[in-house]
Amino acid sequence: MLKKLSPLELRETCDPVMFSFRSTEDLEPLSDIIGQERAVKAMEFGLKIDHKGYNIFMTGLTGTGKTSYARAVVKKAAVGKPIPDDILYVYNFTRPEKPIAINLPAGKGSEFSKDMEKLIAEVRREIIRVFDDENFENQKQALIDRYQRASMGLFEKLDETAKAEGFTLQRTPQGIITIPLRDGKPMSQEEFEDLSDEERKALEEKGRTLQGRIDETLRKVRALDKQAREELAHLERDTALATINPLFEEVAVKYAEFAEIISYLKSVKEDIIKNLSVFRTERREKTDGDSQQILNLAPNVPHEDFFLRYRVNIFVDNRATKGAPVIFETNPTYYNLFGKIEGKAQFGAITTDFTMIKSGAIHRASGGYLVLQAADLFKDPYAWDTLKRTLKNSEARVENIGEQYRTVPTVTLKPEPIPVRVKVILIGTPYIYSLLNAYDEDFRKLFKIKVDFDVEMDRTPENLKRYAAFICHICQNEGLIHFDPTGVARVVDYSSRLAEDKKKLSTRFNEIVEVLYEASAWAAIDGSASVTRDYVDKAIEQKVYRSNRVEEKLFSMIERGEILVDTRGAAVGQINGLSVLDVGDYIFGQPSRITARTYLGDEGVINIEREAKMSGHIHDKAVMILTGYLGERYAKDMPLTISASIAFEQNYGGIEGDSATCAELIALLSSISGIPIRQDLAITGSLNQHGHVQPVGGTTYKIEGFYHACKIKGLTGTQGVVIPCQNIDNLMLKPEVVEAVEQGKFHIYSAETIDDAIEIMTGISAEEFHKKVKASLKKMAETAREFMDEEK
């Protein structure tokens, strides 16, 4: 049934009287999110369940408060939870390429690092002191003297043996040689040659025997030398241990409950003893010239880099953390998430060590929460797969990207993997969620909690009060001027307009907050103590003005007749349809002329937009539905021998949707029957094959678009719009349009069936209209049959 709508049905207005406060300053600020009961329950459950795979994906349109809510609720959930351990990396003395990870209670990591710095500094100082001490030098010299005396005794005994055999010993660079004696003096070569063969052979035999004793003596001397070095090493080791043991014992007692630390301290002590020469040569290093040290000209001078092995890399420091860590990573690149191994240029090469291992957000969030924006995460080609692998294995590896793709493996650091226990919260759009859900088999296993944010909530008195508390919260947090009841009421009405529903409020709080900011700014410019309705209206008007340049251009072209739109009279096969244009930050409606032409043939209904590849799938389907309706209504007792074309005139950007189905059908039937259509009316509505009108989107903007066109061409008092009856609740028209309806200058009708629309658009009854259409179709069928008969 056709219904003419009253002004009260065109807009819902919030009465400021319902608010008992003088200003939002009198209210208690809102402490939680409103209008998202489903999302809140899902989030609360997701944060409480502590099992593998129960990570959270927050989905919803931009501006619904997902990020702000996540920030607030996750921080609240983290309070009171245990603080995770500090994570340290230390040098692996057995396998230097694999640094060891050690966990210590929060705050102990930095404390242990300082203790190690202090310990090594004291060890270096004490080792230099003790080995420069006179007592050590005396012990060392006594040991050396003892072995020197033993060695000298062996050589003296060897000399005596040689003399007894008639030889003397002479030391040369080639070793010890024997020289025969004559009359107590070394024999010359001439004297040796003057000897008889028997004498020479006897001397040579004695020389060989003596050489054996020389070799034996040298072996004993070398053994003594080795024994001396071993005793000297033992002396140095015992001296060093006696010096450093008390220092290590002090640290070991402090960390006695941590087995990994005790094991590490033991390894450090053993390495120091093994490298005592490096510690002892520090004194020489300090006395060498700076230039010699820089150029590394002094042999065996220890470089300061040697002592890096005793440092502690505080990989994750939780000393300032309260409760579980909450990490919001705003730039989730691979390295920011999973850490990296840095390098430094040194003598033309890149070098690294375990102190250059840097943590990522996943490590710092272990034991707590990691919040990421999905769109930012997927900008890095390696981040998503690595995140999934980390969550599946519950461990994070620090490795640079290039290591996975080298054709030739190179020696590099392989830090020990870090066990991680983290709840990841991804924030993204419904589109990203649906893609992951459909095409990534791991997604549903790892992100089992969906937190779905709605874009609207019921417009109840309770929610209106909470909306006022929300405005109070924003004013207090952002330092805005507070709103009076009229200002709050106007914001509520604007919220319903955003929701495109009189009975709903928008939860796209980002757009609401923008209006709050701007209304407060206008109030501040005028020096007002509070934000009233006028400032909210001005903020909305100026916001629209900044974005509606395209709309003004289009309606200017309508006014000048460049875009053809009739708002008076009647025409056959021509109707005013309505469409919505979205230019990104602004949406508006505009009238579109739809025309239909029919002629003999059997091609059926031709969608010109489709033929020109300017039509979307939904619009193509809608045009096909017209054929179904025509067959149901007119072709039960005769064939449809008709060809028809339907077009959106002056459409250069394509068209999508089914909201013009009613308009297209009426234009088509008008062309068939020759019955003119009122041009002072526009119509929007979808249609099914049975002729029932179905609801469409953007009704408010469409009505305002046609009203605007009628206004610039001149209001006649007969103009108006026909909409589906189901869209009445979606109307939140501008006060100007409502006022025009009140004054009888503009009219809005609702239709349940296509027959309702036909009657108002043509001015004749639906029954009479269909009779004329059927008669025209019958005549066309007869003409076609006669033509075919003549052809035969």
Image: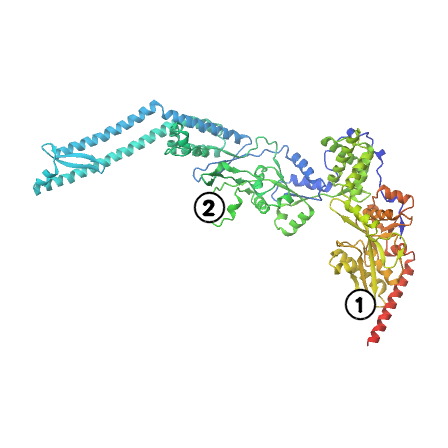
Horizontally, is 759 left or right of 220 in the view?
Answer: right
Q: Residue at the location (9% across, 38% down)? A: 191
For the residue pair 725 and 253, the one nearer the viewer reads as 725
Q: Which mark is residue 602?
A: 1
Q: CA distance from mark 2 to mark 1?
A: 74 Å
Q: Residue at the location (81% across, 50% down)? A: 557
The type of colouring in the image is: rainbow
Can you tell which quarter of the image residue 737 is in? top right
Mark 1: secondary structure: loop
In the picture as drawn, the residue positioned furthest to the bottom comes out as 792
In what quadrant of the picture does the C terminus appear? bottom right
Question: Image height check: is 290 above or below 616?
Answer: above
Badge 2 density bin: few <14, some 14–19, many ≥20, Cα 10 Å:
few
Q: Earlier in the sequence, mark 2 or mark 1?
A: 2
Q: Position of residue 410 (x, y in %)?
A: 46, 46
Residue 245 in sight from this viewpoint: no
Q: Residue at the location (92% across, 44% down)? A: 743
Q: Position of residue 729 (x, y in %)?
A: 83, 46
How many circles with numbers are drawn on the protein? Answer: 2
What's the amino acid at mark 1?
Answer: Asp
Q: Position of residue 676 (x, y in %)?
A: 89, 58
Badge 1 density bin: few <14, some 14–19, many ≥20, Cα 10 Å:
few
Mark 2: secondary structure: loop
Q: Which mark is residue 418?
A: none
Question: Image height check: is 652 above or below 449?
Answer: below
What's the amino acid at mark 2?
Answer: Thr
Residue 232 in sight from this viewpoint: yes
Q: Residue beneath label 2, please? A: 410
Horizontally, is 109 left or right of 379 in the view?
Answer: left
